[in-house]
Amino acid sequence: MRVDDIFAEALVDLGAEDTRFRGILTPASAVGAAKVGVTAQFLDNAEAYHRAYLDVAYWRYLIDNALAAAHDLGEPATIIDIGSGSGNSVLPLADRFPDATIVATDISPQLLAILRDFIVKRADRPQRFGLVAADASAANYRAGVADLAVGAAILHHILDPALVLASCHRALRPGGWAIFFEPFEAGNVILKLTYQRVLAQASAAERKTEGMRFLERMVADYTVRQRPRSDPIFRELDDKWMFTRSYFERIRDEQGWAELIVYPLNAADTPLHNQAAVHLKLGAALPPDALPAWAWAVIDETDGGMSPDLKREWMQEGAVLFRKRPAP
Ligand SMILES: C[S@@+](CC[C@H](N)C(=O)[O-])C[C@H]1O[C@@H](n2cnc3c(N)ncnc32)[C@H](O)[C@@H]1O
């Protein structure tokens, strides 16, 4: 399958306008279009984002687990990766399916250019990769062209994720799978409440430390994301959604998917403790001891108050797998 055959409209090379983006295609209708709902983090600051978040080994682990859950997938010949960024999911997919054509799509040509430079260095057939700069909510794929669609941490960035799922449903062949990895509301709301509890117990001097100031920013960030979906503020935010299982169940029923599987990504005895440590590290480059021992005790107490089942149900991050109805 050629990249041009995946999309229902003509693709043009962005390199004609800007040599930095040579080899990155875009639908003709997207040339010059405003990039709505995405900030400089993924565009002009792409290099810094790539350095902070490149973790192919972690994504390989998540993708392998999800592929094990996607029963009857077979050996996909054509894979569309949605919101590929600089390649955290594309590279594991390329290794796992060495004969597949992989179309990596993203709204950011800057991130795709970083991925392109990785791919051309790979020994195995760079021509089996396509790089397409496209808004996932407007992507116009031909019907039934793909065996598998994968989106690693993409849906929560989209103003209306149902549009992305509808376009995947169209693009997939009968029986094909769409696999996503996304944040979930329940676990994150518990984390927000726990951070608020820590902040309420902190002294005035402790509130001025870097760790506590970071918790304040996290609480503010969560609070904005809990505003009604109609709020125009979401156009200014990169992180827009925290999902519920019910949201995806509604989409399954409305769009006619045959199957939906949702499971937690990081099931653990101490999910809040683990996630708080990740937040400090990735959000502010802070070590765990940026918070005092008593703050960790508050977090651990909340972890200790939940049964193993509840910890799984109240996940912070989850895999979401949709299967298109197989042919009769
Ligand atoms: C959290 S990053 C994940 C990137 C990559 N999948 C990974 O795991 O490293 C989210 C990605 O979504 C892209 N993105 C944001 N809004 C988008 C949109 N409307 N259409 C397509 N991609 C979008 C960003 O440019 C960014 O690459």
Image (cartoon, helix red, strand yellow):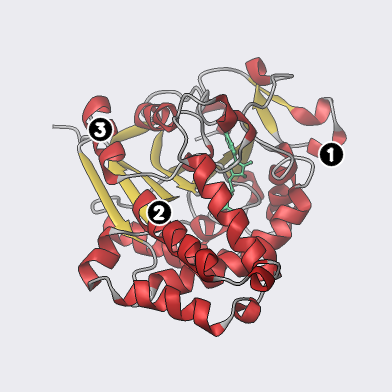
Whole-angstrom CA distance, mark 3 to mark 2, is: 21 Å
Gap between marks 2 and 1 measured at Cα? 41 Å
Task: Check the image and report above or below for 176 versus 193.
Answer: above
Q: Distance between the residues labelled 3 and 1?
A: 41 Å
Spot occupied by residue 221 in the image (x, y as percentages of width and height): 57, 48
Q: Which amino acid does label 2 sit on?
A: Val
Of residues 308 and 78, which is closer to you in this image? 308
> For the residue marked with disc 3, what is the amino acid?
Arg
* Number of the front mark, 2 or 1: 2
Residue ID for mark 3: 250
Instruction: Give whichever of discs 3 and 1 has the lower sequence position.
Output: 1
- Closest to the camera, between mark 3 and mark 2, is 2
Report the residue at 73% width, 28% height from top: 13
Task: Give the side of residue 43 with respect to residue 328, left or right.
Answer: right
- Contact (Cβ within 8 Å) of mark 3 with mark 1: no
Residue at image mark 1: 20
Point out the image quarter for the C terminus.
Answer: top left
Callout 1: SS:
helix
